[in-house]
Amino acid sequence: MFNYSLDDLRYFCAVLKLGSYKKASERLGVSLSTLSRKIRFLEQNLQLTLLNRDSRRITLTNIGELYYERYGKLFDDVACIEQELSDQKHKPEGLIRITAPIFLGKHFLSAIFCGFLKQYPEIKLDLRLTNTLIDLEEEGIDIAFRARNSTLDNWISRELKLTHNILCSHPKNLNRLLTHPKQLDEHDKIICLGLTPWELKNTLTNEKYSYQPNKQVRFEVDEIEMMRIAIESDVGISYIPDYVAHPLIEAGKLEQVLPEWQSEAQSFSMLYLNRSQIPKRVRLLIEYTLRYFLANTVV
């Protein structure tokens, strides 16, 4: 059974590639005596002579040439891989895989991603907009954006914005007589997958009420944009994120129902793997996103 190491083979290949023991010892950072001893150990272990030695030059034996052809390519490949990994760590280039909820991605992140791509032309983004909680590591995701469900083992979570859900309807909807969420049963409703029950808290009294919209559900959707369209079309009352509702309320397209009631604050967060060496391209997008949310009031 052979007892040599990959280092012994690497030393042998380095001597051949550089053409001398001296150059190889300098490149490898080992003494000449250590280098010579390692190669002799390799030959003794193989019971083969790999090098012809004289005072002027180093040449290969026939078997040494076979070894060098095979292992020289191996160490060249390793060197290329190491260089590629170094480039990924230090240069702003390569691919970043991202996932985000559909409407949140469109509403909050589109300007960030487009601005980032213009600033770093060698970086590419692969964006998966989905409302499904995918397995981030299995899908090879570098950065995930999530509303709620923002804590994962081994992932760092950075809060970007706090949001609330509020009750809204078309301004023509006769809902002004409502005084409590329990009265919602008699009104037409639009519900969105993942946003039930309607968890509400009174901002004046701190009373909490969990409303399950089971009665008079006219429309059930799985995407916030469709829910917004349905509310604007006067289909019914719904429970909608405030960042969607507020501009429409100001424009007179929606009206808030039970304005003293809203959900508790929910965190919109950015997640990335907790590892010591994040590729530079990923770190740049993380920093760019944090600066953007710090500098902008996104509504």
Image: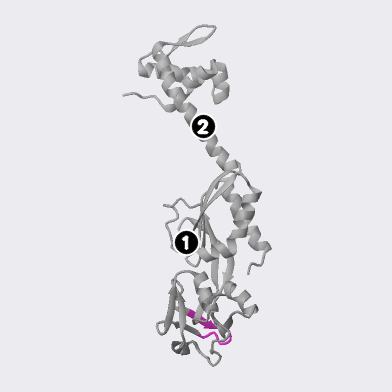
Residue 201 included in the magenta stretch of the image: yes
Residue 227 included in the magenta stretch of the image: no
Q: Among all residues in the image, which is located at the extreme front?
A: 233
The one nearer the camera, 147 or 120, is 120
Q: Nearer the viewer, mark 2 or mark 1?
A: 1
Name which quarter of the figure residue 258 lies in. bottom right
Residue placed at 62% from the left, 55% from the top? 114
The one nearer the camera, 203 or 14, is 203
The amino acid marked with disc number 2 is Cys
Residue 135, image x, y percentages? 42, 57
- Contact between labelled residues 1 and 2, with CB atoms less than 8 Å apart: no
Q: Among all residues in the image, which is located at the extreme bottom?
A: 177
The one nearer the camera, 51 or 79, is 79
Residue 279, image x, y percentages? 55, 46
Residue 106, image x, y percentages? 56, 63
Where's the N terminus, which quadrant?
top left
Residue 295 shows in the view = yes
Residue 195, image x, y percentages? 46, 74
Residue placed at 49% from the left, 27% from the top? 76
The amino acid marked with disc number 1 is Thr
Q: Which mark is residue 80?
A: 2
Name which quarter of the figure residue 39 lies in. top left
Q: Secondary structure at mark 2?
A: helix
Magenta range is 199-207
For residue 132, above or below residue 137: below
Q: Which mark is residue 155?
A: none
The colour scheme used here is one colour
Q: Which residue is mark 1?
A: 130
Residue placed at 53% from the left, 6% from the top? 55
For residue 46, above or below residue 194: above
